[in-house]
């Protein structure tokens, strides 16, 4: 896995949460754009999100979890407790954006809460 900066690690985690249920981004896309809005140009975001969605959807579920864990660890090492709390809320907002939480989304979200709680 490559080294990611904090914003890219957060972006990757949100993308994985958004596609975990096997559906298209839909309502989750707005949450991702809101997270990245301070870092990237909006036109760049559309292309980047689409490209990353295709790449992540092609991964096996085990590989998706490995990428998620790597991004979690990198975000954690580079963030403050306040940034992690804010990110956890963004992750919950993203997963609930379509008014339903799939078992797959729940698995990734629980992993995020569990691993970060273990290190606090």
Image (tube, rainbow, N blue to C red):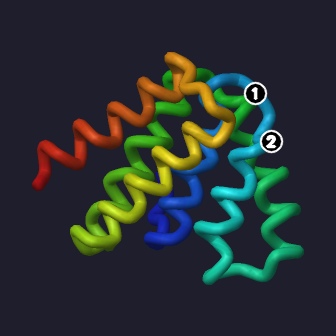
The answer to which of 98 and 119 lies nearer the viewer is: 98
Rendered position, 84 above or below 27 = below
| Disc number for residue 23 | 1
Rendered position, 34 above or below 103 = below
- Asked if labels 2 and 1 touch by Cβ distance under 8 angstroms, the answer is yes
How crowded pointer 1 is (Cα within 10 Å; few <14, some 14-19, many 20+) is rated as: few
Direction top: furthest residue: 103
Residue drawn where x is 34% and y is 70% of the image: 83
Between circles 1 and 2, the one closer to the viewer is: 2
Rendered position, 31 above or below 117 = below
| Disc number for residue 26 | 2
- Circle 2 SS class: loop
Q: Please identify the quarter of the rendering in which residue 27 is found.
A: top right
| Disc number for residue 105 | none
Residue 40 place in picture, x, y as percent: 71, 80
Q: Please identify the quarter of the rendering in which residue 58 is found.
A: top right
Residue drawn where x is 80% and y is 42% of the image: 26
- Circle 1 SS class: loop
Rendered position, 97 above or below 61 = below
Residue drawn where x is 32% and y is 54% of the image: 73
Left or right? Give the position of 26 relative to 59.
right
The answer to which of 29 and 49 lies nearer the viewer is: 29
Q: Please identify the quarter of the rendering in which residue 38 is found.
A: bottom right
The answer to which of 12 and 117 lies nearer the viewer is: 117
Q: CA distance from mark 1 to mark 2?
A: 8 Å
Left or right? Give the position of 82 relative to 35.
left
Residue 3 place in picture, x, y as percent: 45, 64
Residue 22 place in picture, x, y as percent: 71, 23
Quadrant where the C terminus sits is bottom left
Residue 88 place in picture, x, y as percent: 38, 53
């Amino acid at each position: 896995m490559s080294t990611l900066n904090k914003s890219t690690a957060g972006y990757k985690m949100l993308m994985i949460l958004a596609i975990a249920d096997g559906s298209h981004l839909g309502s989750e896309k707005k949450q991702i754009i809101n997270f990245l809005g301070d870092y990237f140009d909006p036109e760049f975001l559309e292309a980047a999100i689409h490209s990353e969605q295709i790449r992540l959807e092609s991964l096996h579920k085990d590989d998706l979890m490995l990428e998620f864990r790597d991004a979690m660890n990198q975000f954690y090492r580079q963030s403050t407790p306040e940034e992690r709390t804010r990110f956890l809320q963004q992750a919950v907002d993203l997963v609930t954006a379509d008014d339903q939480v799939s078992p797959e989304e729940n698995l990734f979200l629980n992993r995020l809460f569990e691993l970060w709680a273990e290190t606090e």
